[in-house]
Amino acid sequence: MNDIVIRFLKALPKKREDQFDEAFVLLRKSAGINSNLLRNYNLIGATEGNVVNLLYDLKKIYGISEASRGLVRIKKKPLQSKGLIIK
């Protein structure tokens, strides 16, 4: 299930409503999820803040960080010579 969630997060749908629908389905399939939390998400719907919170909860439940999603790009700085001479 973790891999499914990571694939979903890497290729989020463009429309907020689609993001909400798919994330909500994944959250419902999660083990041990609080039914009141599900009810609250369903009641509020696909608002911008609710989608952000829903995606955050999915990441938290499955222990997914930005790095594990592969979305963090580390900029490598070129090595600069300090002019030190080693003998």
Image (spheres, helix red, strand yellow):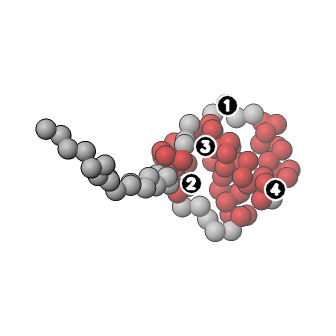
Task: Please indicate whether residue 56 sits to the left or right of residue 42 in the image.
Answer: left
Residue drawn at point x = 68 percent, y = 68 percent: 15
The residues bearing labels 4 and 2 have C-alpha atoms spaced at a distance of: 19 Å
Q: Amino acid at mark 1?
A: Gly
| Residue under label 4 | 45
Measured as percent of width and height from the top left, residue 60 is found at: 63, 38
If you read the primary sequence from the N terminus, does the residue marked by circle 4 or circle 2 appear first? 2
Q: Position of residue 6 (x, y in %)?
A: 52, 49
Left or right: 66 with respect to 21? Answer: left
Q: Which residue is mark 2?
A: 9
Q: Nearer the viewer, residue 39 or 49?
A: 49
State the quadrant of the C terminus.
Answer: top left
Residue drawn at point x = 61 percent, y = 65 percent? 13
Q: In the picture, residue 27 is in which quadrant?
A: top right
Q: How far apart in space, not on screen, are marks 3 and 1 (Cα)?
A: 15 Å
Question: Which amino acid does the dot numbered 3 rest on?
Answer: Lys
Q: Amino acid at mark 2?
A: Leu
Residue 74 visible, this orientation: yes
- Other-residue count near label 3 (Cα within 10 Å), few / some / many at <14 / 14–19 / ≥20: some
